[in-house]
Amino acid sequence: MKDFKFDVDYVRDQFPAMARTVNGYPAAYLDGPGGTQVPKRVVDKVNDYLYYHNANCDGAYATSRESDAMMENAREVFADYFNCGADEVAFGANTSSNNFRLALGLVRTMEPGDEVLITDIDHEGNRSPWRTLEDFGIVVKSVKINTEDITLDWDDFKSKLSKKTKVLAINWAANSCGTITDVKKYIDEAHKYGALTVVDGVHYAPHKPIDVKEIDADFVLCSAYKFFGPHVGVMYVKKEVGEKVKTVRVMAYDNEETPHKFETGTPDSELVMGAAECVEFLADIGERHTKYFEDEIIGLTGRRRNVVAAMLAIDKYEESMAVQLRTRLRKYPGLKLYGVPEGEPRTSTVSFTIDGVHTHDIGVFFGDRGLFVWDGDFYAIETINNVLKLKETGGVLRIGLAPYTLQCEIDRVFEVMDEFYKVIGK
Ligand SMILES: Cc1ncc(COP(=O)(O)O)c(C=O)c1O
């Protein structure tokens, strides 16, 4: 596919934030894994809901009926995003809250001594909710990481999985350094033991197409603010599982059905509208790039086809810049990159440390020059602080690419790196 050209101008034109400057430098948003910028059309959708359709659910009057219809439409939009049914899409405040809710629901049918398996590669949003179940007598075990490449240790997973395992909560892509886990392999194994599987797709979602049927997960969680949306969480719930399990919510009716039984109370409707508009935005990006991916999207139709094309195009665009970033960063003395070897599955998130330098100092130096990067542990506390033991030195410096990232911004990273190295005298 030699002639691939990503329409980055179309993408950037949608984001008012791209016009920002800092100390005379154009702002470069390399902080996507923490949260992306928001296109105007998404903000317009949120406003449109609040201005013209704002109402609580199930009323017998115009705005309430419109609001209900818009919520159901949002589920259909996300059904195309996940490749599932509209009745398999639930919304909630954010992924951590969705996980807490899920954990508190699932524990209702567990016995003391039952086990839950979490992982050392996960963000606390997919660990803490499950760890709270220790208070209910549940044994929580965590799968180790191979420290040299930050991947999950399959043998450790196998040794901890048993008939007692009721839930496997696993990460799809690590926000600390971009490692992608072959979750299907883990899910298939966990299912053999009758465990339910919860996949944290938060960092995976902005970079790759999601197909929940392909991985056969029972739950997949993601957060719209990581892919151009407002702060709201979205969750896929496999229908046959959703129908069986207990949830926590207001006890108004006995006959609550999935997916509504996974939503505790009044939904964040305006934010859900914004989140659905992100998927429409992705579909529009995809439509401009389908010609490059005819083989990959064969058999797909409509919005699903365009969303998959969008994610393939975004991935391809980001990947070429990420490879460049990693290749050029490797040349700096004392710089250590984290993650899998080149060619292994990963996202476009690049993390590193510099020997003898507190990472926060790099973050400040970059930030003052308009390069918005993250430093720290990003709540991947087990990986960064406990396994890699980087807490004292400020964690890692994380550069995250997004479809609005420009090649000239990558070049600026190296201008600023050169400048930083002069300052530290390396
Ligand atoms: C991989 C990953 N999982 C979970 C979360 C938590 O998501 P939320 O902020 O929606 O609770 C984050 C947030 O950064 C994340 O990166």
Image (cartoon, grey):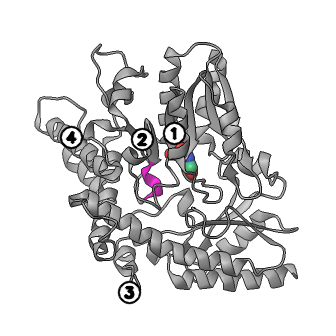
Is 423 left or right of 12, judged from the image as shown? right
Q: Give the mark toward the camera: 1 or 3.
A: 1
Position above or below: 133 against 323: above
Q: Amino acid at mark 2?
A: Asp
Q: Give the mark toward the camera: 4 or 2.
A: 2
Ligand 1 under 8 Å from disc 3 Cβ: no
4 or 2: tag closer to the N-terminus: 4
Q: Amino acid at mark 3?
A: Asp
Q: Does residue 195 show up?
A: yes
Q: Amino acid at mark 4?
A: Ser
Residue that carries the numbered disc 1 in the rendered image: 187
Residue that carries the numbered disc 3 in the rendered image: 3
Is 36 left or right of 147, judged from the image as shown? left
CA separation in Å, label 3 and label 4? 44 Å
1 or 3: tag closer to the N-terminus: 3
3 or 4: tag closer to the N-terminus: 3
Residue 326 found in image quarter: bottom right
Where residue 166 appears, as percent x and y from the top left, is 55, 24
At mark 2, the secondary structure is loop
For residue 284, the mark is none
Where residue 191 appears, as percent x and y from the top left, is 50, 32
